[in-house]
Amino acid sequence: TTAGHRETIKTNGLDFCKVDIMDEFGAVMLPVRGGRHFKEMSMGKGIMDYDSMVVYTHFKGHTMGGFGGSLKNIAIGKVGKAMIHAKEGQQWGQTQDAFMERMAESAKATVDHFGKHITFINVMKNMSVDCDCAGSSAAAPTAKDVGILGSTDLLAIDQATIDLVYKLPEAQQKDLRERIESRHGLRQLSYMEELGMGNRKYKLVSLD
């Protein structure tokens, strides 16, 4: 709820400035171009007040998505979440591959909306197999802190993040990799490529 969000903002000390909650005043439908599941996707109406976006994401595993990177961060909204999960009038029921594809199409609506005025940051720190929404019940992280990645290419940054996870020592990557693969999470990447949402080839440039 908006009231709940406002209380969380206050609790975390972020009420020193104006904070917009995108769906506080309703939703808007953005077009999904070239998708097989959606023609449009619901977004918080406040998105129309901005001409650029920075997507700041804590990378981690996820119960449904396998992993939560930049794509998932912009794919799952309030009304859109129900659209992505729903099947034949039921609240849940999508297969794992279809779920990944529907998330990608939702994210594409946002990426297409902002065009070249969107950039992505993935923070590879405290990476548990569980989403941050699990709170104190989340499994303890087993992967070491890797660093922070940035890119203007959504597919490239999530691909690079996955590649860095898979390069970790076996004991550190095992749990996270199992979570990703058991949920078909890598379908996020291949379907983004099919939709033309970026490039799987990239060059890592160290800023150290």
Image: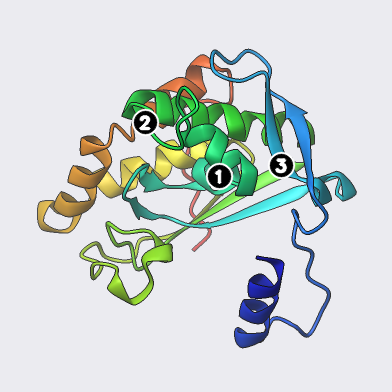
Counting every numbered tag in the picture gives 3
Asked if residue 83 lies left or right of residue 99, the reply is right
Q: CA distance from mark 3 to mark 2?
A: 22 Å
Question: Percent x, y for residue 61?
Answer: 33, 52
The disc placed on residue 43 is 3
Quarter assignment of residue 114: top right
Q: Label 1 near label 2: C-beta < 8 Å?
A: no
In the rendered structure, which amino acid carries the disc numbered 2?
Answer: Gly
Asked if residue 2 lies left or right of residue 102, the reply is right
Q: CA distance from mark 2 to mark 1?
A: 16 Å
- Mark 3, Cα crowd under 10 Å, few <14 / some 14-19 / many 20+, is many
The disc placed on residue 66 is none
- In the image, what residue occupies the spot 24% across and 67% down? 139
- In the image, what residue occupies the spot 45% across and 31% down? 90
Q: Is residue 109 above or below residue 130?
A: above
Asked which secondary structure carries label 1, the reply is: loop
In the rendered structure, which amino acid carries the disc numbered 1?
Answer: Ile
Question: Percent x, y for residue 115?
Answer: 76, 32
Closer to the chain start, of discs 3 and 2, is 3
Question: Percent x, y for residue 110?
Answer: 69, 36
The disc placed on residue 93 is 2
- In the image, what residue occupies the spot 70% across and 73% down? 3
The disc placed on residue 76 is 1
> As drawn, which residue projects farthest toward the left?
171
Closer to the chain start, of discs 2 and 1, is 1
**Discs 3/2, front:** 2
Question: Percent x, y for residue 206?
Answer: 48, 54
Quarter assignment of residue 5: bottom right
- In the image, what residue occupies the spot 75% across and 62% down? 21
Residue 145 is at least partly visible in this image:
yes
Quick one: 175 or 63, which is closer to the camera?
Answer: 63
Asked which secondary structure carries label 2, the reply is: loop
